[in-house]
Image: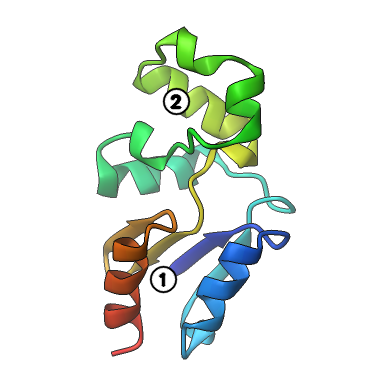
């Protein structure tokens, strides 16, 4: 199943989703109203082989908790991903057994080429 993890209050997520020609091919998961489960995080990990790749170091909470100084390991990244939705780099799109994490221009361009093909 194709999945799209997003934040409904995020304008960047909305803008990216608007570029997808057929959103009905995705299970849409608003991570604010549907907190991430361990199995969802583990599924993402199975593609990235890294919890850190799923983690947003731009999150306000990352700065507030001074996590840069914490030198998090993979277990630490997973712990925080499960604790609060803000730590997930958004959006996360799983499409045809491929994952696209975050909103970097190259990532979104690659995703749109596959999803809108």
- Rendering coords of residue 31 (x, y %): 64, 52
Residue 41: which numbered mark, if any?
A: none
Which class describes the residues within 10 Å of circle 1: few (<14), some (14-19), or many (20+)?
A: some
Whether residue 84 sits left or right of residue 75 in the image: it is right
Pointer 1: what residue? 2
Whether residue 7 sits left or right of residue 74 in the image: it is right
- Rendering coords of residue 24 (x, y %): 53, 85
Whether residue 71 sits left or right of residue 83 in the image: it is left
Viewer-closest of 52 and 94: 52
Q: Residue at x 64, y 57 (%)?
A: 7
Is residue 51 in view from this perspective? no
Q: Height in image: 47 above or below 84? A: below
Q: Residue at x 48, y 83 (%)?
A: 19
Viewer-closest of 8 and 15: 15
In what quadrant of the picture does the C terminus appear? bottom left
Pointer 2: what residue? 77
Is residue 73 in view from this perspective? yes
Q: Are marks 1 and 2 in contact (CB under 8 Å)?
A: no
Which class describes the residues within 10 Å of circle 2: few (<14), some (14-19), or many (20+)?
A: many
Q: How many labels were placed on the picture?
A: 2
Q: Residue at x 56, y 82 (%)?
A: 18
Between disc 1 and disc 2, the foreground one is 2
């Amino acid at each position: 199943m194709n999945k799209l993890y997003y934040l409904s209050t995020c304008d960047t997520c909305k803008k990216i989703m608007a570029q997808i020609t057929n959103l009905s091919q995705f299970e849409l998961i608003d991570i604010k109203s549907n907190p991430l489960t361990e199995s969802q995080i583990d599924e993402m990990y199975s593609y990235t082989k890294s919890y850190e790749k799923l983690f947003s170091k731009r999150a306000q909470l990352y700065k507030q908790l001074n996590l840069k100084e914490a030198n998090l390991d993979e277990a630490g990244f997973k712990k925080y991903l499960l604790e609060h939705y803000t730590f997930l780099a958004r959006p996360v799109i799983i499409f045809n057994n491929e994952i696209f994490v975050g909103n970097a221009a190259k990532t979104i361009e690659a995703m749109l080429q596959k999803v809108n093909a």
